[in-house]
Amino acid sequence: MEKRLFALSLMGSLVASASLAQDKVDEIVVESAMTNQTQVNQNDVARILSAKDISQFGHQNFGTTLDSTLGVTSSNYGSAVGQPVIRGLSGNRITVLRNGITVQDVSGLGADHSNDLDMNNVQQIEIIKGPSSLLYKSGSAGGIVNVIDNTIARSDFTERDLSVALDIQAVNDGTTTSGHYHENLGGFNVSLSLADTQFDDYEIPDGADDETGLQSLMNSDYGNTAEQIGISKVGTWGYFGLSLQQNEGTYGIPFHGEEHDDHADEGHSEEAELLEDDDHHDEHGEERILAVVDSETVTLEGSYNVNGGWLNSIDYHYRGSDYALTEGHAGEPDDSTRFENDADEFGVLFKSENDAGAQTILLNHVTQDISVAGAEVYMAPSESEETALGYYISRSLGGLSLDAAIRYDHVTRDGSIDDEGDVTFYDIDYNNVSYAVSFGNLSDGPVGVTLSLAHAERAPSVSELFMHGVHLSTGRFEVGNIDLKSEESNNIEVAFNYEENGSFMKTNVFFNDVDNYIYLQDETDDDHGDHGDEHGDYILAEYLQRDARLYGYEFEVGKNLDFYRGTLRLSLGRDEIIGEFSNGADIPRMPPARNVVSASYLESDLEVSLVVKNVSKQSRIGETEIPTPGYDAIDVSMTKSFALSGDRALDVSIYGNNLLDEVVRNHTSSVKDHVPLPGRNIGLRVQMDF
């Protein structure tokens, strides 16, 4: 609430202030999060998803939206939750950004926790794979995903834009209604966005639930309301802007490995009251388990053009996030658990750019206060501070391009462990140094080759250090390890691109050697029997470290064909990742190999897309895992645009997901055996632009 009042007061002050002279820019230019450079897009380490890529198959969760990108999969947990997996790495190894600033939520504390993102009104998503992403953010040994919108406009809007959209889906009787407005009013750029999503339990294919024979997945419903407002001022001096974002939602938790113990009367809150009043309580009965989300984010950012000597501009940002998630049984508010993350991030970038290249100096500071209170207290309150100092340089060296970065991260984790009343407090510091260098050819020919080398260090997260208790969403008694060291990833990657006369080929081959790889190890059935009732019926899972290596490739070949009225693009892609510990054992939850065939046809007012995913059986499994069957999934979409009178336009889209009604289970999901993906879905999306 305090952040909301601060944001609204400052917005009012901006609007009331005198307008400054300004130079108008005709379009919004979206740049890479940290460097403003475009050379990162010259190889497939970086992938850009456009607004049409994001919306063409209907409203989906975050991970599912990215799932067709080579090298990227999703760890799903029902309709609301889809955490991204990049080259086999997930969780705290992946940094999720909005407009270049970290998204602060509690997704790192549980596989059933959603990323705090509204997927409506998104301009594009930038995916950067592997440790080379340390050029942009610390701790992201697996990669980063940057979701970009124009809530804070960095250049002036030149015309008013108003759009409304309705998305209807059959598989969950769901609807998403959204609206967006932006305009330059009195020299200020104003942006408003609203979205409301309501999904019922989704249908699952025949045979997906042999135990009960149900045709839909209980507690897979999802409802969310998202609001965004932004204002900015642009001039020859730079820009300054402020935004306020709110997400309020409720979603079912389709798996909870729990025992009904007596719980303390804690965590009773406004969100807990919503558990008691949930509309689906009667439908689901005693098995109704849900999560209530309430988040508020204030972002302030700007850039000042210096244009003097070495220094061209100074970019700065602040983001304050208040995130709360309360989960439990409907009708039992005192049996709930409340997760909170109160975070602040400050950053300054000093930028220099000339004909010789570009340089950036980065200063960044993040604080987080994370707490878990109520019935399921598996981690005591913790505090984290991360301070980063980084340097980035881009240069042209004859026929080569050079991109290099080095950064120092000082990380502090404060927390405690309560072992049956014996409380021990810890204050742990980490000093990490990471660096990366990339060489690429600058020839005008059809062939591009890039060599990237990176050393990335990641401090253990608070959950990996201080977890100690029953984690119902995974059905485990999870135990952290305060002796964990920082992970050290050493990565080498070669990218080869070819494009000529409409034909193209992209190949990325990578090898990632990880010292002190952190993983969660389940006990075996024999070990569980030896423990007796020490941890009840729950599996004991401990955070351990062991050296590991991950290696694989992404390959795509295709052709663009021009016709009289439009263009047809055909492509065949394949990705494969192997993860092994130093003793030769397989790392758990590695994505299986898959082939992705895509075809798209585009003409002036018509776009048709087809994506076929052929996913192999995953038989390379960890010690306590079981194999996951392969599957074939077909998604299609067709969008027709109509020009109406008065500068109005109407887009009508029909789409289908999983048209073969295949039983789909993601091996990367910790609940794959209990939570299959939705069955066949047919949807309709209508958007009107004014």
Image: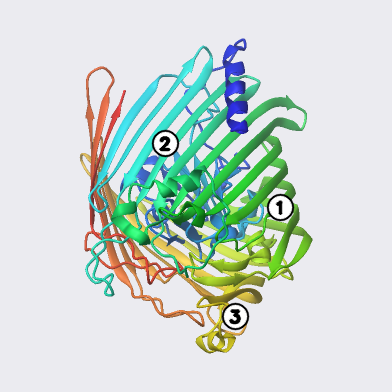
Q: Nearer the viewer, mark 3 or mark 2?
A: 3
The residue that disc 3 covers is 534
Q: Amino acid at mark 2?
A: Asn
Q: Amino acid at mark 3?
A: Glu
Label 1: which secondary element: strand
Disc 2/disc 1 C-alpha distance (Å) = 32 Å
Name the mark on residue 655.
Answer: none
Task: State which tag comes first along the sequence, 3 or 2.
Answer: 2
Disc 3/disc 2 C-alpha distance (Å) = 50 Å
Along the line of sight, the residue nearer the viewer: 608 or 602: 608
Disc 3/disc 1 C-alpha distance (Å) = 31 Å
Within 10 angstroms of label 2, few (less than 14), some, or many (20 or more) residues?
A: many
> In x, y percent, where is residue 449?
54, 58
> In x, y percent, where is residue 660?
21, 63
The residue that disc 2 covers is 121
Q: Residue at x 49, y 48 (%)?
A: 272
Q: Nearer the viewer, mark 3 or mark 1?
A: 3
Contact check, label 3 and label 1, Cβ < 8 Å: no
Along the line of sight, the residue nearer the viewer: 250 or 576: 250
Task: State which tag comes first along the sequence, 2 or 1.
Answer: 2
> In x, y percent, where is residue 421?
71, 68
Name the mark on residue 384.
Answer: 1
Q: Amino acid at mark 1?
A: Ser
Label 2: which secondary element: loop
Task: State which tag comes first along the sequence, 3 or 1.
Answer: 1
Within 10 angstroms of label 3, few (less than 14), some, or many (20 or more) residues?
A: few
Residue 550 drawn above or below residue 348: below
